């Protein structure tokens, strides 16, 4: 049994090399890109659950877009995303974060389709491999490096 993985294939075609994702991709964005990432992190860090929920909000709380996770996303770790948040809470967070990024950063309007929200939710789960990474950091990196989530 081999201890190493085979090298990743180059799927970008014969005449174009593919840039690696991750920290290198962010540094390759230049000053404007780094500023954009900082703005995105700032916007995403202001998002969070609603601590003022009352019994009169029961009808609203039944909506799949209403967040019942009481902790702010900037204080939520990947460990909490993977082990404590329910699928419904993850979907609501993904909808909240993706909608905010698309509308406030990239000029989008309204809610993205549920299929795109579900894809973003799955993407967050895939990038949330460091237990102590915050949800804000994970979603910022995902949104920044994956243009399919942009409007």
Image (cartoon, rainbow, N blue to C red):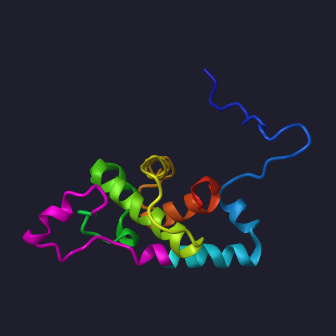
Q: Residue at x 36, y 50 (%)?
A: 82
Residue 44 position (above or below residue 15): below
The correct choice, above or below, for 113 with respect to 41 in the image is: above
| Place of residue 143 in the rendered image (x, y in percent of width and height, measured from the top left) | 57, 61
User: Residue 48 colored magenta?
Assistant: yes
Q: Position of residue 16 (x, y in %)?
A: 88, 45
Closer to the camera in the image, 116 or 136:
116
Q: Is residue 102 left or right of residue 21?
A: left
Residue 115 falls left or right of residue 26: left
92 with respect to 139 (left or right): left
Quarter placement of the C terminus: bottom right
Near-viewer residue (83 or 149): 149
Q: Is residue 123 above or below residue 75?
A: above
Q: Residue at x 59, y 60 (%)?
A: 150
Left or right: 16 as drawn, with respect to 42: right
Front-lying residue, 26 or 145: 145
Please tell me which residue is depicted at 25% across the width and 73% down the height of the picture.
50
Q: Is residue 134 visible?
A: no
What is the residue that sits farthest to the top in this orientation? 1
Residue farthest to the right, as pictured: 15
Quarter of the image with the N terminus is top right
Q: Which residues are magenta?
A: 43-66
- Residue closest to the eye, 54 or 76: 54
Q: Position of residue 63 (x, y in %)?
A: 24, 58
Residue 150 in sight from this viewpoint: yes
Question: What is the number of callouts on the image?
Answer: 0
User: Was residue 74 drawn as part of the magenta stretch in this picture?
Assistant: no
- Looking at the image, the residue that sits furthest to the left is 55
Place of residue 2 in the rendered image (x, y in percent of width and height, measured from the top left): 64, 24
């Amino acid at each position: 049994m081999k201890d190493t993985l085979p090298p990743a294939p180059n799927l970008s075609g014969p005449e174009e090399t593919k840039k690696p994702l991750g920290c290198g991709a962010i540094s390759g964005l230049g000053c404007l890109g780094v500023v954009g990432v900082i703005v995105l992190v700032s916007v995403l860090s202001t998002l969070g659950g609603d601590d003022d929920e009352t019994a009169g909000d029961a009808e609203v709380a039944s909506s799949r877009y209403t967040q019942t996770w009481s902790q702010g996303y900037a204080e939520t770790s990947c460990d909490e995303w993977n082990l404590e948040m329910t699928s419904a809470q993850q979907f609501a967070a993904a909808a909240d974060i993706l909608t905010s990024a698309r509308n406030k950063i990239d000029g989008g309007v309204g809610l993205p389709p549920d299929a795109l929200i579900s894809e973003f939710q799955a993407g967050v789960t895939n990038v949330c491999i460091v237990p102590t990474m915050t949800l804000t950091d994970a979603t910022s990196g995902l949104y920044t490096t994956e243009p399919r989530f942009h409007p």
